Image: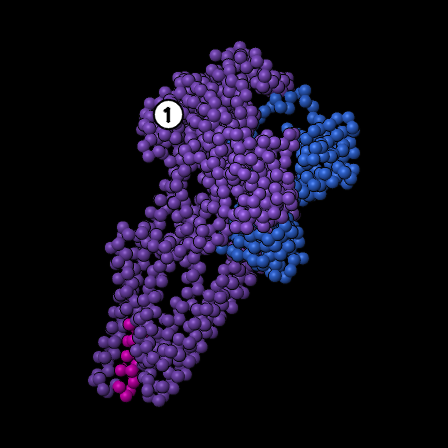
Amino acid sequence: MTDTTTTYKERMPDALADRCREALREGETVRIAAATDLTEDLRFEERWLLVTDQRLLRFDSNGSGAGNGDASIPFIELSDAKSAAVEELVGSGRINVVIGNEDIEVIRYTPSQRAKFARIARGIDQLIKDDPVDMQGEVDKTRCDRCARLLPEPNGICSACTNRLAMMRRIARYALPFKGKLALMVFLSLLFTLAELGPPYIMGRIIDDVLDPSAAGASGDPFSFLYLLVGAYAVIRLVSFVLEIFKDRLSVWLGGRVIVSVREDLYENLSRLNMKFYNKRQVGSLISRVSNDTESMMWFLVDGVPYILTNLLLLVGILVLLFVTSWQLTLMVLIPIPLLVTGGWYFWTRLIRAFRTKYYRWGKLVGMAGEMLSSVRVVKTFVQEKREMRRFRSSNEGVFRGDYESEKEAAVFFSTVSMLTSSGMILVWYYGGAAVIDDTFTTGALIMFIAYLWMLYEPLRWFGELNTWSSRAMSGAEKVFEIVDTPAETEDREVPVEMKDMQGEVEFEGVTFAYEAGKPVLHDISLHVQPGEMIGLVGKSGSGKTTMTNLLCRFYDIDEGGLEIDGVPIRDIGLEDLRRQIGVVLQDSYFFSGSIAENIRYSSPDASLEQIMRAARTANAHDFICAKPDGYDTQIGENGKELSGGEKQRIAIARAIIHDPRILVLDEATSSVDTHTEKLIQEAIANLVKGRTTFAIAHRLSTLRRADRLVVLDAGRIVETGTHEELLDMKGYFYRMVETQRASTAVMAVGGGKADPNRGANGHTT
Amino acid sequence: MPDEPGVDAPDTFEFETGIENAPVEPYQAHEIRVFRAPKNTVRMTVRHERSYIRVRPVNASPMAHSDRYVSLLDIKNEEVAFIKDLNDLDEGSRQVIEEELAHRYLRATIERVNSIQMEYGVTYWDVMTDRGKREFVIRGHENTHWASDARLLLTDVDGNRFEVVDYTRLDPHSIQLIETNV
């Protein structure tokens, strides 16, 4: 560990800090001060844990507590204690200190504080044992810095505080490379707006200057003027038609382009993030970020932004024209607008809620139908059709109710909007009409006015929707950028040590590791492996075998101790160099859709077919591949579903042979296959292992008889190491494992099952 | 604990069920006595003959039957006794087990909902429970589970657990909030 934290102190309320100072002895120093959110009788209240170099104390938030006379637990002298550890319960956890033969509960906490108290318990344990104290580790941020709202996920982004403007700016940055096109689009939108404003004006002129009998005589031949105006009308319509096509095409292109770059960034970062990130998330939710969230962003960019742009321009243009024509009438027209906007806002929030319920219920219905269809065999065998139908019916009913509720709201909303709009119209018709009769306003001007009014109201009624539209896009953008901004955790050192030719010497030195803070899976593992040595890892499930190999591939970083390859700390080796020289063959190998040849050469795309075939021969895979109608060109199907278990394993081995790693990890590479296939796979593995440092995990102990050394793990600790024979002679843990396994497989053999794979295991140790 | 990806896959350790170990029937309520000795350790004796120095009571079905079906596990997490109904135990034993279960399972009962706010797919709750006031965040619909038409089980983003025993019996404000948001 580079930086060590020897104290951990949260800021105490002043009153409490005073009481604590009083409670301290001469020369006693505080090492840990931490607040919990759960009392010893499980109420949600604050308690403070104080750990000094001599004692453990617990206080109420007002300062009373152990060590002050009114003790609820007697304070604990560290010298009385043997050790400290966390105990995870259901819905809460606690720190226990062992005194004598008893666990004494020191403090209780809710799962929200789990990580923090795991570190604190470690610190207390180290203080008790007089070990160097190290409470390093990050405390997750659970509340937003700005608004103190609880975060949807620890260290996540506060949805309420994302700044829309900043988000827009960020999206705009992706559009920068297309500056010219962007400017062109704005320009076209401007022209389009101007063109749109033309027709009502011409309409007014036709009525006033051509059709009005009083004006007709004044301007000479009414027909030539009519032709002129109608001609102008036609030209304007044509121009706006062409402009609209170009403008829309351009916006689709630009929006699409921007999203392509965003998606690219997202995908690139997803492939760089390390395993810890993926452990915490569901694949489904990540896929939805790549597809749904980027899509909602795209629709906003393609439809929303141009819509806002043209309508804002139109709004300004129309208002100016209206004011010029008649400012009195314009003011009248504006009366319903505030109502329209606030009403729209109010209804939309209600509408969204109704729609959300509707979509949720709809999703449930679809899910239920899907579940029923995919498990139709089970439903039929257990004759549960009626119950399924009942479940479906009630869900279906729920969808109807949700539908009805949302449409009810929607109907009210749209009718209200129409009513408000027409109320403006009524005012204009009444006062405008009166003005025409009084001769202070012309008929043409009134018609023009009303035409503009329609154009004005139309976009306004959608403004409420625009808000949801944009917030959906913004929350999509947020989720996307959250991933784009997540740093890849296992990053290379700035100047990684180059290691093109690894020897394959591996050294674990006191390695401790936990997937989840406070629950170590490996304790103090020390193991030295010579280049080319084959190590068999043995132990029950959960004993830490796979975890050891995960650390070797650096899917995770170790918490304590050191892990070196060829004498270089694994963190200092360039990740590419490292992974290029480590090969993994898993029980369940993953394949990509494509041909067998493509899958074998996945790690080295340049390999020729001859090289591929050589690898396949070594892996005992060549024969069955050739026997297939399409040979090496056989399409493997999604995750190799066209292949049998034994075939998959041998292809995986061939893939590892082409990869030519210096260090090899075989995780349960021989799973349940028939004896003949197992022999073929064993041979293939023997070929693969030659000259490589190998870590092999197998539950069937017979598979490991070729191993140079066996390492027996139990509950994350190494309990025995040695050759097969040495371990058997020891008559310890491994001996017992072999004996019990032999007993159970003997039973199977009697029953006519597989041959006993343990027979002869004793004699064949290399 | 849910399986951690990357931790060893469940295996086929056949030798654990070898022939020598015929399945052992766990002791039943009338055969055992449970007490504390010393104060923080739960001890179990069988017909005053055998003693298990440290046992741990766990609930086999903590959500649906929190008052029944209790299993007593030894240090190796192997079942030594199974109690169908706590009333079958003597008074002292029952009390010890009830105390231990109350300590092991923490599920706060919501008594009043102050506010529920839904934003961007997460729900912010502000509630009063039998254990005090609490705010929490729930993500996604899979963490709100209707155990029946009226009983609601919630798990927040950190793994805190909450329960509404019967939402129709809450105050009108809470009922309305739950109906419109859950």
**Residue A468: which quarter of the image?**
bottom left
- Extreme bottom residue here? A438
Secondary structure beneath disc 1? strand
Colour of chain B as rendered: blue
Instruction: Pinpoint residue A567: horizontal percent, then vertical percent.
Output: 38, 23
Quarter of image, res B169: bottom right
Chain A image colour: purple
Residue stretch in magenta = A198-215
A679 versus A635 height, above or below: above
Q: Is A608 in front, or is A652?
A: A652
Q: Residue furthest front?
A: A26
Report if residue A625 is visible in the image: no
Residue drawn at point x = 38 percent, y = 73 percent: A454
Q: Residue at x 29, y 63 (%)?
A: A189
What is the chain identity of the residue bearing mark 1? Answer: A
User: Which residue is more in the foreground, A3 or A260?
Assistant: A3
Could one spot residue A339 in this view of the protein?
Answer: yes
Q: At x 71% / y 28%, what residue is drawn? A: B52
Amino acid type, callout 1: Val
Residue B86 in picture, x, y percent from top left? 75, 40
Task: Classify A151 as above or below A653.
Answer: below
Whether residue A199 appears in magenta in the rendering, the answer is: yes
Which residue is label 1 attached to? A568
Nearer to the camera, A175 or A730: A730
Quadrant containing the C terminus of chain B is bottom right
Query: In the rendered image of this protein, does residue A656 appear above or below residue A391?
Result: above
Label 1 Cα crowd, 10 Å radius (few <14 / some 14-19 / many 20+)? some
Q: Magenta region, mostly helix, strand or loop? A: helix
User: Is B174 covered by the magenta stretch?
Assistant: no
Q: Quadrant of the N terminus of chain B?
A: top right
User: Which color mode does the image show?
Assistant: by chain
Residue A151 place in picture, x, y as percent = 49, 50
